[in-house]
Every structure is written in structure tokens, then in C-alpha cells.
Amino acid sequence: MKLTTRTIAISAALAALSATVQIIHIGYLSPTWGMWIDVVSVTWVIAYLLFGFQSSLLVSLAGSLIITLFAPETWLGASMKFVATIPIILALFVFSVIRAKRFDWYSKPVRLVLPVLIGTVIRCGLVLPLNYYYAIPIWTGMTTIAAMKAIPWFIIVMFNVIQTIVDVTLAWLIVYKFKLSRFSEGKTE
């Protein structure tokens, strides 16, 4: 699908909003584990629900780049957020292609359950090793073994499950309950 000028403009606005909520950091910081539950990638899922995978990828890449440029200490967080959110968006995309080519396929929230569940399992399978071998050692200077002892795997999984629920639920509410869907292009890839 070719992105229209309108879709690119709205995608750019969503990316800017994503970066803004990262820079002012709207969310909850766990004082014990140092992990955030935030709203940064809500706009990434909104882009998917409105315009499909290409727009969502554009918003997530641009949002990550803006976060890295304007909040340089968060380049690590931006890369982790990107890797963690893409499985959710891909799962939504694959299920919408398999089940129906209608753009409003996810207007019924029950249809989100299976793809979000599968996307979350994939997300957790990616973020566990990335946290232990990449993010935590870079951010804290801990070795991988020390990180595994300090932050149990189920804490990382729990935060990622909650983050997925926040991202998808808020995006769905904004798009379908608050009628942002009226700005959708009305088709899938």
C-alpha cells in the first residue's frame, strides 16, 4: 500500500507525540526495578489501527529516532521499546490479513485477544535475553549473571505484559471509543 500525504502527515504527528510523551515521561517508574510502564508506544499501535503496518512502522521508527536525538540518554530505551512493540504490531497485522481484509477488523475488542496474546509471548521471548545481555548490562554496568540475580525473569515478563495491555487498550479506546477511526483510510495493506 502506498502511503498518502495525509497518512504520512498524521504518522509524523503520531511520532512526534510518541517522542513528546517519552521526553516528559508520562507513566509509572518502578522504584525497585527501574522499569517504566509508559504511553510511548500507544501512538504506534494507534497508527496501526488507523492506517496499517506501514504507517505503524514509520511512526515507531521515527518516534524512536526522535527520542534518541532529543533525549540521548534514552537511545537504549528507544531501541528496547521498538523491539518490544513490533511483535505486537506484527501479530495484529498477520491476524488481520489472515482473518479479513476489512480495516475495522479490530473494532470488536474480542478479536484482539489471540493476536495480542501471541504477540506478547513473542515480545517476552525477545525482551528477556535482550534485557539480560544488552539493556541491563549497558544501563547499569551489571554482568548478565548479576542482572539475572537482581531482576528475576518474571518481573521483566510482568512489566512487558502490563505494557502490552496498556498500549493496546489505550490505542483501541482512542481509535474506536473516541472515534479517531473516522480518520482511517478504511483499508488494510
Image: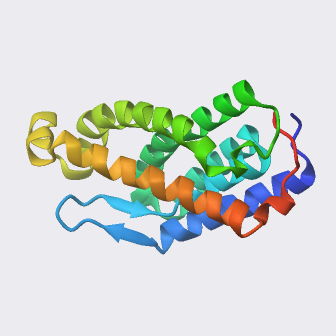
Q: Position of residue 78 (x, y in %)?
A: 47, 51
Q: Is residue 8 left or right of residue 57?
A: right
Query: Which residue is found at the position 81% from the left and 43% from the top?
Result: 103
Furthest-top residue in view?
A: 98
Can see residue 165?
yes
Task: Identify whether 156 is placed above or below 46.
Answer: above
Q: Is residue 160 left or right of residue 113?
A: left
Q: How is the image coloured?
A: rainbow
Quadrant (top left, top right, bottom left, bottom right) of the C terminus: top right
Query: Which residue is found at the position 75% from the left and 55% from the top?
Result: 11
Query: Exactly how many numbered labels are in the figure?
Result: 0
Quadrant (top left, top right, bottom left, bottom right) of the N terminus: top right
| Residue in front for this viewpoint, 180 or 77 | 180
| Residue in front for this viewpoint, 16 or 112 | 112
Q: Position of residue 148 (x, y in %)?
A: 14, 39
| Residue in front for this viewpoint, 127 or 185 | 185
Quarter of the view holding residue 137:
top left
Quarter of the view holding residue 143:
top left
Query: Which residue is found at the position 67% from the left and 55% from the top?
Result: 46
Q: Position of residue 174 (x, y in %)?
A: 67, 65
Task: Identify whether 170 is placed above or below 143.
Answer: below
Q: Position of residue 75 (x, y in %)?
A: 44, 52
| Residue in front for this viewpoint, 180 or 69 | 180
Query: Which residue is found at the position 29% from the left and 40% from the top?
Result: 131
Q: Is residue 72 left or right of residue 106?
A: left
Can see residue 68?
no
